[in-house]
Image (cartoon, rainbow, N blue to C red):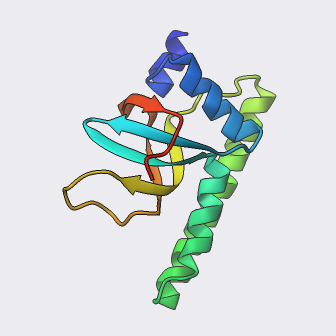
Amino acid sequence: MADKEKQTGTDDAIILMFLDLVEEDGIEVDVTLNIQGAIISGTLIGASAYYEGVTEASKNLPDSTMSKIISKKFGDLKEAYAKQKQEEAEQEQKGSTKTFIHLKHAKYHSKANQPPNGTWWRGRISSIDGFSFDSLS
């Protein structure tokens, strides 16, 4: 477990199980995270869904040049991620490199200035102090 713990920053079987479910089975589940005192809620999704979502959202940017650049870069990241997952499966190390958690429709529950609600969010798994499977929205 030391290698998995080192890479993910958690040995919490529940969060790891849900991360596997969103990655492998494509499920989505509402979650509320406590991260260093901040509370963030949204829908837990897999990395591929995150990359696809950001790519699609970038098409709505008012600057068409920036839209094309972001769409291309996130498309490249999605392809690299898919290649990495394939290599892991071939080496039977599936699930051993999860270091990030992804949310769509993320909302920050704070009085401080935060990014807009309903955004795409990505954070380190090792930063999660607590979680619940529900949404505060």
Q: Quadrant of the N terminus?
A: top right
Q: Is residue 65 left or right of residue 75?
A: left
Q: Is residue 69 left or right of residue 128?
A: right
Q: Identify the residue at the far front of this view.
A: 137
Q: Is residue 36 above or below residue 75?
A: above
Residue pictured at 50% horizontal, 87% vertical:
65
Is residue 72 visible in the rendered image? The answer is: no
Q: Where does the image place residue 11, in percent across and percent down from the top left?
A: 50, 16
Q: Is residue 77 left or right of residue 132?
A: right
Q: Identify the residue at the far left of this view.
A: 112
Foreground residue among 51 and 92: 51
Q: Say which quarter of the image contains residue 53.
A: bottom right
Residue pictured at 64% horizontal, 45% vertical:
46
Q: Is residue 15 above or below residue 54?
A: above
Foreground residue among 34 and 125: 34
Q: Where does the image place residue 15, in percent across and percent down from the top left?
A: 55, 27
Q: Identify the residue at the far right of this view.
A: 90
Is residue 61 visible in the rendered image? The answer is: yes
Q: Is residue 28 above or below residue 107?
A: above
Q: Where does the image place residue 36, in percent across and percent down from the top left?
A: 27, 35
Q: Where does the image place residue 130, in percent across and percent down from the top left?
A: 39, 28
Q: Is residue 46 left or right of residue 4?
A: right
